[in-house]
């Protein structure tokens, strides 16, 4: 049976910020892969008002048992006071790909 895996969605202020986060967590084997999805526009409440800012979204792939460590590491490295870091369980998928995620993340 394949280990449970998660997708972790993160936003960052710039492509350089996102790339730095992605490279660090992949090099540390907290994530097997990071996909930078490119520029997005985020509309959100912050400091009592609606803001609209460009951001870069990314998706990290990891094992379920590494989600807490990955979230903590992203929080340590992130430039935001309250970064968007959310984990979504992968319910099903290519077993070979899910096994690859498990094999490429740290034990």
Image (cartoon, rainbow, N blue to C red):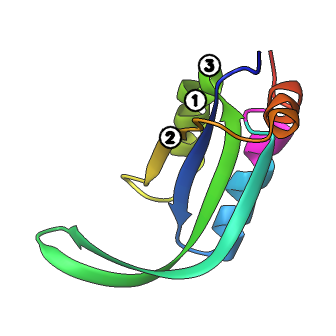
Asked if the residue under mark 1 is in contact with the one under mark 2, i.e. CB atoms within 8 Å, the reply is yes
Q: Is residue 36 visible?
A: yes
Picture residue at 57% right of the left edge, 67% below the top: 57
The residue indicated by pointer 2 is 87
Q: CA distance from mark 2 to mark 3?
A: 12 Å
Question: What's the distance in space between the residues labelled 3 and 1, CA to CA?
Answer: 6 Å
Which of disc 3 and disc 2 is earlier in sequence? 3
Per the model, the C-alpha gap separating discs 2 and 1 is 7 Å
Determine if the magenta segment contains residue 106. Answer: no
Query: In the picture shown, does residue 21 fall above or below 92?
Result: below
Give yes or no for contact between labels 2 and 3 (Cβ–Cβ under 8 Å).
Answer: no
- Name the residue that disc number 3 marks: 65
Q: Which residue is at the front of the view, 79 or 66?
A: 66
Indicate whether 25 appears above or below 9: above
The crowd level at tag 3 (other Cα within 10 Å; few <14, some 14-19, many 20+) is: some
Q: In the displayed structure, does residue 94 sit left or right of residue 45? A: right
Q: Secondary structure at mark 1?
A: helix
Q: Is residue 78 left or right of residue 17?
A: left
> Residue 66 at what x, y percent from top left?
64, 24
Read off the magenta span. 24-30
Secondary structure under badge 2? Answer: strand
At a point 64% along the width and 37% down the height, the residue shown is 92
Measured from the top left, where is residue 37 in percent x and y?
66, 71
């Amino acid at each position: 049976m394949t280990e449970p895996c998660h997708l972790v969605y993160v936003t960052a202020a710039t492509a350089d910020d996102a790339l730095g986060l992605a490279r660090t967590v992949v090099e540390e084997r907290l994530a097997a892969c990071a996909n930078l999805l490119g520029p997005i526009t985020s509309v959100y409440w912050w400091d009592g008002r609606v803001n609209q800012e460009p951001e870069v979204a990314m998706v990290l792939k990891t094992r379920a048992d590494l989600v807490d460590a990955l979230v903590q590491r992203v929080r340590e490295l992130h430039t935001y006071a309250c970064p968007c870091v959310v984990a979504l369980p992968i319910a099903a998928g290519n077993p070979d790909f899910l096994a690859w995620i498990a094999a490429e993340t740290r034990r």
